[in-house]
């Protein structure tokens, strides 16, 4: 018996009867030889961490566009916080931590530059529409590894696709990530907004603070403990009605005071303009995209979808540099002549 088989046996013996054991995975679209050391979900996690789309998350907006300061979250730090919270909960519930981690690390791979502003722009200008959760699946199925995709297991792809609020993951591990995505962004976006002076604790109704906690740390602790307490030994991940209502109220507050706050979002219209103009340009001149995306066009992929692939894969700075190169006039000079 090799190391992977020993791990699989421990999963069957120790995990919750509601957990997704790696030995019972529905598998991959393309059959592969098993690893002697890692389970299928461990391999999925490693493939995500080592892919190009994961590395680009470090230069993509979470909430604040190009914030001045070293401690504001970006899309990568958000992903890592989701993963950490989700693993804590999965471990407490005796679920499969490796599957949970893989879903969490992959859930935002398809996000655009400039966060949800970029997503709105692409969805508005592309006749096929655009949604980051669908794009994240497309990244792992089609775009990575020069069009071969990462060939992830069905369970990981299902969790990535269904991580949004309206999603319905088929595994409890996916359900954990779905909750943890909301918990993480409400927690850290509030922390960032307070650091930026956009909001203070006084903006949170006292009844909500009495229920959830008086600091971001206390509220995170409340959400995690409530989710574990109300999901342990059950076939569904859920909070208590009171705390879930509190989570929804916090989310509504964040939309009102932070996500839609003019002080925090003053540059979003400009960012959306950048994304829209890039889409229109590459729709007109698809031959200007890089080779891996031109290759998709030759494989009869729809041009509109490939243009979205190209732009959504850009980081904030790369999209701005590309915009400047395409649309901002350069100063004219002749070498060797006086200015």
Image: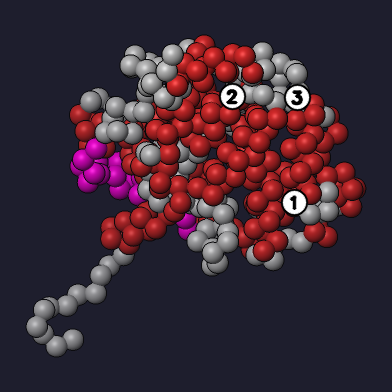
Residue at point 48%, 58% (across, down): 270
> Are there few (<14), some (14-19), or many (20+) residues within 10 Å of tag 1?
few
> Are there few (<14), some (14-19), or many (20+) residues within 10 Å of tag 3?
many
Q: Is residue 163 left or right of residue 146?
A: right
Image quarter where the C terminus lies is: bottom left
Decide whether residue 285 is among the magenta residues: yes
The answer to which of marks 1 and 2 sits earlier in the sequence is: 2
Task: Give the main secondary structure, helix, strand or loop, of the magenta stretch.
Answer: helix
| Quarter where residue 126 is shown | top left
Decide whether residue 38 is among the magenta residues: no
User: Can residue 103 be seen at all in this image of the molecule?
Assistant: no
* Circles 1, 2 touching at the beta carbon (< 8 Å): no
Q: Is residue 64 left or right of residue 148?
A: right
The spot of residue 12 in percent (x, y) is 59, 13
> Are there few (<14), some (14-19), or many (20+) residues within 10 Å of tag 2?
many
Looking at the rendered structure, the secondary structure element under dot 3 is helix
Q: Residue furthest front?
A: 1
Q: From the viewer's perspective, is residue 319 above or below residue 335?
A: above
Check the image and tell me how it is coloured.
secondary structure
The residue carrying mark 2 is: 96
The residue carrying mark 3 is: 231
Residue at point 22%, 46% (across, down): 288
Looking at the rendered structure, the secondary structure element under dot 1 is helix
Q: Over which residues does the magenta segment extend? A: 270-292
The spot of residue 50 in percent (x, y) is 38, 39
Q: CA distance from mark 3 to mark 2?
A: 15 Å
Residue 217 - label? 1
| Quarter where residue 198 is shown | bottom right
Q: Nearer the viewer, residue 197 or 37?
A: 37
């Amino acid at each position: 018996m090799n190391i992977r088989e020993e791990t699989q046996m421990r999963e069957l013996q120790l995990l919750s009867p509601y957990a997704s054991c790696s030995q019972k995975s529905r598998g991959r679209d393309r059959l592969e030889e098993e690893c002697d050391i890692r389970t299928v979900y461990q391999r999925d996690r490693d493939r995500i961490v080592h892919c190009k789309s994961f590395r680009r998350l470090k230069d993509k907006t979470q909430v604040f566009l190009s914030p001045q300061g070293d401690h504001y979250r970006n899309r990568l730090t958000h992903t890592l916080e989701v993963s950490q919270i989700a693993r804590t909960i999965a471990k407490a519930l005796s679920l499969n931590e490796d599957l949970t981690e893989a879903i969490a690390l992959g859930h935002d791979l398809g996000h655009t530059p400039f966060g949800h502003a970029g997503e709105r722009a692409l969805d508005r200008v592309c006749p096929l529409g655009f949604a980051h959760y669908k794009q994240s699946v497309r990244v792992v199925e089609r775009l990575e590894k020069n069009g071969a995709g990462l060939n992830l297991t069905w369970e990981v792809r299902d969790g990535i696709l269904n991580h949004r609020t309206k999603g319905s993951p088929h595994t409890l591990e996916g359900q954990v990530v779905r909750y943890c995505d909301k918990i993480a962004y409400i927690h850290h976006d509030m922390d960032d907004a307070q650091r930026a002076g956009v909001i203070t604790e006084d903006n949170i109704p006292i009844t909500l603070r009495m229920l959830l906690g008086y600091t971001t740390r206390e509220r995170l602790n409340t959400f995690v403990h409530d989710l574990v307490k109300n999901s342990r030994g059950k076939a569904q991940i859920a909070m208590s009605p009171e705390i879930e209502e509190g989570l929804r109220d916090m989310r509504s507050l964040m939309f009102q005071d932070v996500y839609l706050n003019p002080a925090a979002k003053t540059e979003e219209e400009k960012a959306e303009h950048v994304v829209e103009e890039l889409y229109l340009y590459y729709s007109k001149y698809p031959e200007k995209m890089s080779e891996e995306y031109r290759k998709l066009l030759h494989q009869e992929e729809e041009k509109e979808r490939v243009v979205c692939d190209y732009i959504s894969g850009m980081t904030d700075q790369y999209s701005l540099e590309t915009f400047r190169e395409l649309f901002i006039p350069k100063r004219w000079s002749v070498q060797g002549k006086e200015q």
